[in-house]
Image (spheres, rainbow, N blue to C red):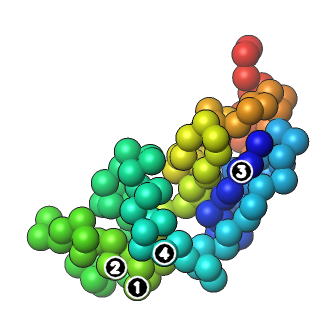
Amino acid sequence: MSVTIYHNPKCGTSRNTLAMIRASGVEPRVVEYLKEPPSRVELIDLLARMGMAPRELLREKGTPYAELGLEQAKWSDDELIDAMMEHPILINRPIVVTAKGVKLCRPSEVVLEILDNPQIGDFTKEDGEVVPARGR
């Protein structure tokens, strides 16, 4: 199975998601999206495949969201995408792409819904939270 993760190695949720993918037996294509952001066309495609509006993908914490006034309803979808293109940190993460679908994996265990082998056993996140094995 081909898996791609749009990843930020500084993000615990992103690191946990990557670890879950690897625990499923897959070595994904890792795109550090802050270094290699998706193109505008790719971002629009990811949003469509997730069934999300651009506003739903915006990250507020640790970004210029407030400084740019993005909480205001006046921004069109195109303008929000423009902001994400200019400031990739505004793109929430991790986004995972598989043959089964595309998901914003928050919380990280959402990734199990789109993996071929979600049976990874009990998984302990970095913060100590245990995600029980599926099927229990």
What SS does tag 2 mark?
helix
The residue labelled by disc 4 is 39
Using the image, determine if residue 134 lies above or below residue 88.
Answer: above
**First in sequence: mark 1 or mark 4?**
4
C-alpha separation, residue under disc 2 versus residue under disc 1: 5 Å
- Choose top left, top right, bottom left or bottom right for residue 136: top right
What SS does tag 4 mark?
loop
Give percent across and percent down for residue 76. 18, 68
Please give the label number shown on residue 83: 2
In this view of the protein, can residue 16 be seen by the observer?
no
The residue labelled by disc 3 is 3
Which residue corresponds to the image point at 14% horizontal and 65% vertical from the top-left? 73
Q: Amino acid at mark 4?
A: Ser
C-alpha separation, residue under disc 3 versus residue under disc 2: 27 Å
Give percent across and percent down for residue 60. 39, 68
Give percent across and percent down for residue 115. 70, 37
Q: Amino acid at mark 1?
A: Glu
What SS does tag 1 mark?
helix
The residue labelled by disc 1 is 86
C-alpha separation, residue under disc 4 versus residue under disc 2: 13 Å
Residue furthest to the top in view is 136
Q: Amino acid at mark 2?
A: Ala
In this view of the protein, can residue 21 be seen by the observer?
yes
**First in sequence: mark 3 or mark 4?**
3
Closest to the observer, 44 or 123 = 44
